Image (cartoon, rainbow, N blue to C red):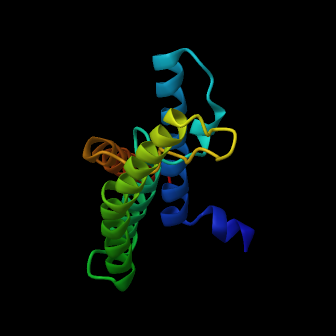
Amino acid sequence: MLKDLFSNYILLAAVAAWLIAQICKFLIVLLATRKVRAERLFGAGGMPSAHTAMVCSMTIAAARAVGVASPVFAICFIMACIVMYDAMGVRRQAGKHAEAINKIVREEENEEQFDLLKEKLGHTPLEVLGGALLGILVSMTVGLVM
């Protein structure tokens, strides 16, 4: 059972892409700010999109493992489209709303009364593209190893 889990190409490619994307986010922030921000290892938002990397890697791995005519590929493809749309749309707008609300709270000097909202939620199209390209690359690389 456990051996099967660790030999599942689709699962391993997806998880590897997510992990590599999160590490990339951490390193990009470290190099840009010279500050360690451990939250970047798990948090949403930033370059590249880890959610996009994961679903794109999963989709390419499914295409390679079971073919583009399979129901598994179809489900992965639809899921990838939804995740990328959500990252650039709903989650990005929610982050912009949080920025505006936090600005009001800071201006009114109410930070002690209200918790500031998380602003890094969604992604720019470039961050999503970066995640997609990373996911494809990881999936192809994992496929060569397995």
Q: What residue do we see at 30% from left, 63% from top? A: 85
Residue found 35% across the figure and 66% down from its top: 80
| Percent of width and height locating residue 90 | 36, 62
Image x and y of residue 76, in percent: 38, 72
Q: Nearer the viewer, residue 33 or 104?
A: 104
Q: How many callouts does the rendering have?
A: 0
Q: Is residue 60 visible?
A: no
The quadrant holding residue 91 is bottom left
Residue 114 percent across, percent down from the top left: 64, 47
Instruction: State the residue in front, 128 or 102.
Output: 102
Residue lying at the far top in this picture: please name it.
Answer: 34
Query: Which quarter of the figure is the N terminus placed in?
Result: bottom right
Say whether residue 118 is left or right of residue 86.
right
Above or below 10: residue 121: above
Q: Along the horizontal axis of the image, is 2 left or right of 116?
A: right
Looking at this view, name the residue that lies furthest to the bottom: 71
Which of the pair 127/90 is nearer the observer?
90
Outermost residue on the front side: it is 108
Q: Position of residue 63 (x, y in %)?
A: 33, 69
Which residue is rendered at x = 70% and y = 66% of the image? 3
On the question of residue 49 being in view, the answer is yes
Vertical side of 67 occupied by 22: above or below: above
Query: Which quarter of the figure has residue 11?
Result: bottom right
Q: Outermost residue toward the right?
A: 2
Residue drawn where x is 43% and y is 39% of the image? 46
User: For this rendering, which residue is in front, 49 or 5?
Assistant: 49
